[in-house]
Image: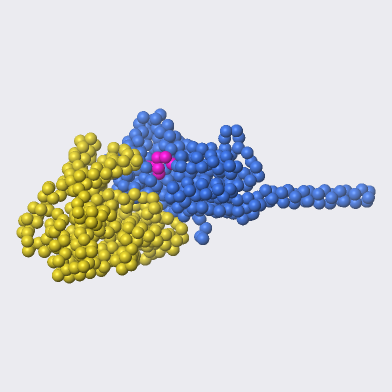
Chain colours: A yellow, B blue
């Protein structure tokens, strides 16, 4: 595996991410150089543009809306952004590997439904949690297997599994119903929805832990290096002997696990598991949007947790500010759509199509 | 004397026989009105207690009276719903039962169906386009009654802030449009009432939770939340509970009055609920189908209408029998 990584690093060097330029960094760049590269405006202009827009939006809201820049409101922003952040972590890893997981929300809803049904049936909380995680692992592995071994493109296979999972759950577990109620009176559910450790909400702490885990996965593990190598050039990564199939299965399992964690937090908060968000909701698009907005390109091989965080901050602050300004959902969607299109146009202007894109194509 | 008694008995028996024969003929003729007729129900989605309740009522009538009844589920897919409706027109049923997601979506198709001789019964959610019949709640009345209750609880003399958050399902849905208009008409007469937020949740409990949590943070003295549908209001109610404001903020909702919602009223997630009893609406829809098949004609420029009676369920006076259960499949 190490030999493969050394060989694949040659192709990865065509990119501008230090993780790709230098999978075994100590051999070429110093640690300081790596950090300088990481935060260089020249190498990551889009991130700084989005970060600048976010700061500008925060400033505007802070001036326009009384009580916007308060600890209480910032805490609400963080709590409302938790699920998006956790889902974004899973989606970011998938997209960096040049994949796409359209089944993420389906998995989230399915495992939360199983979790809720077990709790309602009187099962122990830990057993319900364990069952939800096991189901997530199975569903993630199914996605990974279809993509890696059956070689169905990620777009098609995860679209199919999204429909399959949601359909099976509604037909098999819910007899056609679309809603599962979570028993909010259980202390464990209360812990996830309103619990605090010191002054920090439990859900936010879980979000931070998932962010750190994703950072460690991407930057400190062999699997993380493989994710970048696969995203940069899948064929090269495969030809160099990397076990890309096994890696793909693990990547989709990781995505499903983030979906499971997000699902338990969301359902504990709202007291419901709502299957309509699979077919009608905009959550999946928001997850992809925060990932892309922060600078993680759909063509893969670039970006990291920092990029995701930038996207989440912008979208969450916009949500909160526009809600406080009492703007309608349509106007909110319009603003988000305009920002996403602007970001893509700016990205295309700053990073014009190159030989790499022409060879591999966009997603 | 005996002759006269005999004659009277014979006359009585003859009258009874004639009446019996006539009544059998009348039943037979009524039955023949329904035979061979076809009804297609196009709901926004099955799997909701509302639509399941309505369908149960209509299906019972179909089985009793011998007409065909079919459900074509749009499963929350609005594009599919238009296509399903267009296909239903091509299939030439006698009646289409339409559950309009918005006031515009099916308007043109309803007009086309009616002009093709297919009667359209709109159920609970009205389109901009009138048709032969409507069975459902009077949304303006619900909006007005809820607003008046909010004014009594939060308005002048209540000692409360008068701040209200409204959470419609979709701003273009018929119920949300009518309830918003009626509510605002009442609030305009009461300047002490301030609507601090009026944002749609797309019927999603989690979106309603996020909106309510944000609004509560900004307005800790909020007096009431009015969710236009019970299901998404569960999310709003849980946000109020989680913020520790269950005793200060009144949570209002409307809906079909199924047990799922009533469990949430009992648990203090929803405080006051205007139920239009979906089970009763199903029975009314079934009866309306029969009347339409018998040839009932709407008044000039209007529709045959049945307004659903309302049951106001309050947390403090909650009775389990105020709700209904969908029989297990």
Q: Residue at x 51, y 52 (%)?
A: B72
Inspect this view and state whether residue A207 appears.
no
In the picture, measured across the screen, residue A208 lies left or right of residue B129, that is left
Residue A232 in which image quadrant: bottom left
Q: Residue at x 14, y 54 (%)?
A: A16
Q: Residue at x 81, y 51 (%)?
A: B17
The quarter of the rendered structure image containing the C terminus of chain A is: bottom left
Magenta segment boundaries in residue numbering: B167-173
Q: Nearer the viewer, residue B264 or B1?
A: B264
Residue A226 in which image quadrant: bottom left
Q: Nearer the viewer, residue A144 or A272?
A: A144
Number of numbered discs: 0
Residue A72 covered by magenta stretch: no
- Percent coordinates x, y for residue A271 in the rendering: 36, 54
- Percent coordinates x, y for residue B189 in the rendering: 40, 29
Q: Nearer the viewer, residue B51 or B258?
A: B51
In the picture, measured across the screen, residue A61 lies left or right of residue B52, that is left
- Percent coordinates x, y for residue A242 in the rendering: 20, 68
Indicate whether B173 appears above or below A303.
above
In the picture, measured across the screen, residue B261 lies left or right of residue B210, that is right
Q: Nearer the viewer, residue A156 or A140?
A: A156
| Secondary structure mostly seen in the magenta stretch | loop
Inspect this view and state whether residue B21 appears.
yes
- Percent coordinates x, y for residue B317 in the rendering: 45, 47
Q: Residue at x 19, y 62 (%)?
A: A229
The quarter of the rendered structure image containing the N terminus of chain A is: bottom left
Residue A338 in which image quadrant: top left
């Amino acid at each position: 595996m190490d030999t493969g990584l050394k060989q694949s690093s040659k192709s990865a060097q065509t990119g501008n991410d230090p993780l790709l330029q230098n999978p075994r960094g100590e051999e070429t760049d110093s640690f300081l150089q790596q950090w300088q590269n990481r935060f260089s405006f020249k190498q990551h202009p889009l991130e700084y543009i989005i970060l600048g827009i976010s700061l500008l939006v925060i400033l505007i809201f802070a001036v326009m809306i009384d009580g916007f820049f308060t600890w209480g409101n910032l805490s609400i922003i963080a709590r409302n952004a938790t699920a998006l952040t956790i889902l974004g972590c899973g989606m970011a890893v998938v997209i960096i590997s040049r994949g796409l997981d359209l089944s993420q929300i389906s998995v989230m809803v399915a495992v939360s439904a199983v979790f809720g049904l077990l709790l309602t049936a009187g099962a122990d909380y830990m057993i319900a949690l364990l069952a939800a995680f096991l189901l997530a692992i199975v569903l993630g592995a199914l996605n990974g297997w279809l993509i890696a071994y059956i070689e169905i493109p990620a777009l098609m296979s995860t679209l199919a599994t999204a429909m399959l999972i949601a359909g099976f759950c509604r037909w098999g577990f819910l007899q056609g119903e679309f809603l599962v109620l979570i028993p909010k009176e259980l202390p464990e559910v209360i812990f996830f929805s309103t619990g605090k450790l010191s002054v920090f909400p439990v859900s936010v702490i879980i979000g931070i832990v998932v962010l750190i885990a994703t950072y460690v996965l991407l930057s400190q593990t062999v699997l993380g290096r493989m994710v970048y190598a696969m995203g940069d050039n899948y064929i090269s990564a495969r030809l160099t002997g990397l076990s890309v199939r096994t890696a793909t299965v693990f990547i989709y399992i990781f995505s499903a696990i983030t979906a499971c964690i997000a699902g338990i937090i969301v359902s504990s908060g709202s007291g419901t598991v709502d299957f309509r968000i699979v077919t009608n909701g905009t959550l999946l698009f928001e997850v992809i949007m925060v990932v892309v907005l922060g600078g993680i390109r759909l063509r893969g091989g670039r970006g990291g947790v920092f990029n995701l965080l930038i996207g989440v901050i912008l979208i969450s602050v916009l949500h909160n500010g526009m809600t406080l300004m009492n703007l309608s959902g349509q106007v909110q969607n319009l603003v988000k759509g305009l920002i996403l299109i602007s970001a893509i146009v700016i990205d295309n202007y700053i990073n014009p199509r190159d030989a790499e894109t022409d060879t591999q194509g966009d997603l | 004397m005996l002759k006269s008694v005999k004659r009277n008995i014979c006359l009585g028996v003859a009258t009874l026989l004639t009446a019996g024969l006539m009544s059998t003929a009348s039943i037979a003729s009524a039955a023949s009105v329904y035979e061979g007729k076809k009804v297609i129900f196009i709901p926004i989605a099955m799997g909701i207690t509302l639509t399941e309740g309505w369908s149960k009522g209509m299906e019972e009538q179909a089985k009793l009276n011998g007409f065909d009844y079919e459900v074509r589920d749009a499963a929350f897919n609005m594009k599919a719903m238009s296509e399903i409706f267009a296909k239903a027109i091509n299939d030439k049923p006698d009646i289409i039962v339409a559950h309009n997601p918005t006031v515009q979506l099916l308007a043109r198709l309803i007009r086309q169906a009616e002009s093709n001789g297919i009667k359209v019964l709109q159920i609970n959610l009205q389109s901009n386009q009138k048709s032969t019949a409507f069975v459902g709640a009077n949304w303006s009345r619900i909006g007005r009654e809820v607003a008046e209750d909010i004014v009594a609880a939060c308005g002048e003399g209540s000692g409360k802030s008068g701040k209200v958050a409204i959470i419609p399902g979709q701003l273009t849905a018929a119920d949300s449009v009518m309830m918003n208009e009626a509510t605002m008409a009442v609030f305009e007469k009461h300047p002490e009432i301030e609507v601090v937020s009026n944002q749609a949740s797309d019927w999603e409990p989690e979106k309603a939770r996020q909106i309510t949590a944000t609004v509560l943070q900004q307005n800790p003295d909020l007096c009431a939340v009015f969710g236009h549908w019970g299901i998404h209001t569960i999310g709003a109610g849980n946000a109020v509970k989680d913020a520790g404001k269950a005793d200060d903020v009144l949570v209002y909702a409307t809906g079909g009055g199924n047990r799922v919602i009533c469990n949430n009223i009992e648990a203090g997630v929803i405080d006051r609920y205007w139920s239009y009893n979906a089970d009763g609406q199903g029975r009314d829809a079934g009866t309306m189908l029969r009347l339409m098949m018998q040839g009932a004609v709407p008044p000039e420029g209007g529709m045959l209408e049945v307004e659903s009676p309302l049951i106001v369920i309050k947390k403090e006076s909650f009775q389990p029998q105020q709700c209904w259960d969908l029989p297990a499949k």
